Amino acid sequence: MLLDTTIPLSRAWNTWSDRPAEMVFLPLGLRLTPVVFSAREGKASLLPAAALRFDAHSPDGAEISCTARHAGSELALGWRRDEPWSVLGTWARGRLAEWGQRFWLSYCISAEDGSEAEWDAEAGAAVITIGTRHLALVCREAPVEVSVHDSPQALAEDFEAHGYWHIGSRGVRGRALGLRFNLEMMPEGALAAAVADSRERAIAAARARLARAEAPAAPRPVQEGPFAGALEAVADVIGWNTVWDPVNRRPYTSVSRLWPLGAFAVWFNDQTYAALMSGLFEPGLAAENFRAALASATPQGNFATIVTSRDAWVDRTQTPMASFMLWLMHLRGAAGPDLLAEAYPALLANHMWWRRERDPDGQGLVSCGTSDVGASLYKGTHFGARNETGMDNSATHDEAVYDPRTRTLSTLDLGLNCALALDAEMLARIAAHLGESARAAELEALAAQTRALIRTRLWDPERRIFANRQRHGGFVRSLSPTSFYPLLCGAADAEQTEALRGHLADPALFAGRYGLPNTARSEPAYADNTYWRGRIWPNVNYMVWQGLRRAGLAAEADALAASSWELFAQNWAAREAGENYSAETGEVRDAPDTDPFYTWGAMLPLMAVGQVMDVTPWAGWEIRHDGTPLRLGPVTSPAGQVLLESAAGRLSLSRGEAGLLETDFRGRLGGITLAPGLFRCRLFPEVPGAAATLTLPGVRPGALIAARLAGAPLTPLTGEALSFDISAAAEGAMLEICHAPDA
């Protein structure tokens, strides 16, 4: 009876289908489909993605809103779920291009297995029965008409064939039941659906849900204060792009609801980025996304670049960033030990595949290629090989030559090799965490070896910058922001890092109001403004931002995060999260080759979230506080789902109703550990010597075992909770507080 039993009940109602305004109860395959009809144009629509403006969408589907556009008219549609078995739908008309009497909104109720729906006029409810389960749908106002059809599409076709005057499709029982409203008689309205184990209980539950129409949903992730709206933006992009894969029977966050790539499409790196971002809210969804990426593993050892319902690019892969994403998820608390243990063998095999298959002359550095396996599009071509960087038409590939003998490009790709070094480093951490100390040492040695080769072989001493080069020749002239990736993998020495700082500020290279075009501004290819030639890419900005932070270039990292947020917010006002952006105007839609609602577009606001609170391999869990009022959360952290707030200059961290931390310290708290009986962090004060205290609200003073600041003992302050004066904290001072764990 149950179609899909793997979906948590808390997410069973959601916008799973390829019609984003449609609400689906996935375990039973029940669908509530809005259908609109314009009499002026004689056209009906089931509201595909292109007909919607994507407004709010919590990752778990608890709160959803969108603006539907059809024939020049607009209406607001919404869904809200405050408990697992029922859902509330609402509508409100906006701008109309015709008399509301002639613009119709219908809700079509149907089941994937073909079970018939029945209209019970006496009860004022539509009911579908599947096995022992019953779905009931009730409306605030009775529909003008109830019609029967074979499918939601047939309802739309009926409108187009006969208009709204037609009564020939009236009925009370059929495979699809249409509840028809018009926007003159019902300019706004509500309906509720509920599932129960009897018809009567389902109708009663639906009525009860309709009666509490204004009941609030679960707390929505919010970010107020610095970078206000960034956390919501990440949540909305993840929420809207999370769909159901009908072929493999699994949920996953797609690259975009707008791309017609088949019944499903999984780009390897994109899927791991989606896992990272969904982990901010739904660790379960994060694991599902990461497993969707792992599913592309091949017997050869690599992950396929992309797998769709139409093709599988098994002859090539993408830059090995997945281990970095997984370790970030683990540090945040969004990836449990089971996922680490499950993913590690495949990630390790992929890493070794790179070194075995893409280093044809044993230099220790790799090139892009396309192996002689599979039958995928572009296999055995120059274009297919450069797909492995993801930067398909980048000018950095213009000087590369495809060698059919080695099946690789002639160039050593800088970004790829930096990713390989980082991959070895992250795999070493995962191996150590899983208790494989010998393998961890081997991987760390590989990482160090690759870093050294990048530092020496891919550093152009004439231009004083890292660049691609021919395997047996000179440097490629074109540059991209991957010139900064040696910061991310730790390959750049102090002198090189300083040179990179200067290049970052050079307006002939990458500086500008909108930072990091994917071609240097002085190059001819920059003017192309086509895909990877001149445009700004969110995933690249994110990686450079991480590298700047790792290298200690805090001011540069802050500036990049701020300009990236400005770029994103400019377009988010129109609810667009671009696949890429113009480096001149910051626009998404100035070029025809960019998707306007792409999942990795949310990596720009992800950076803004991280400017307030983040978890990294190099700084641990960190929080920044300058006294500005703020609110961030609920968001996943090493201490669980937490809420960070600041008011009147005092910062508080809480988990549910439990207070975890309070302080008026201004600056950065890094390397935070919050565990039973232990609080530890490093303090980086904004103004050394400024008065500040720190309190652990749930801990009594008498529970103290020991407290130290920079190794010196601390005496608690008088009060009901354990509190300390931390005014003496110098840059990087370690604060450690040990107490009875049950206090």
Image (cartoon, rainbow, N blue to C red):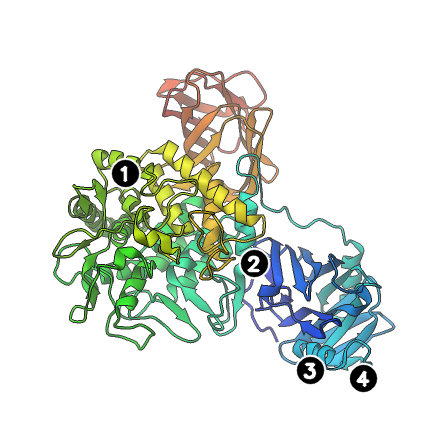
According to the picture, the residue beneath numbered tag 3 turns out to be 150
SS class of the residue under badge 2? helix
**Amino acid type shown at disc 1:** Leu
Quarter holding residue 551: top left
- For residue 123, side relative to residue 192 (left or right): right
Q: Residue at x 67, y 56 (%)?
A: 81
Q: CA distance from mark 4 to mark 2?
A: 37 Å
SS class of the residue under badge 4? loop
Task: Give the residue at the far right of this rendering.
Answer: 122
Q: CA distance from mark 1 to mark 2?
A: 38 Å
The answer to whether residue 258 shows anywhere in this view is: yes
Residue 648 at x, y percent in the picture:
60, 24
Q: CA distance from mark 1 to mark 3?
A: 63 Å
Nearer the N terminus, badge 1 or badge 2?
A: 2
Nearer the N terminus, badge 2 or badge 3?
A: 3
Q: Residue at x 73, y 59 (%)?
A: 90
According to the picture, the residue beneath numbered tag 1 turns out to be 500
Instruction: Answer few, some or many: residues within 10 Å of disc 3's Cα (few below 14, many 20 plus, some between 14 and 19).
Output: some
According to the picture, the residue beneath numbered tag 4 turns out to be 168
According to the picture, the residue beneath numbered tag 2 turns out to be 240
Closer to viewer: mark 1 or mark 3: 1
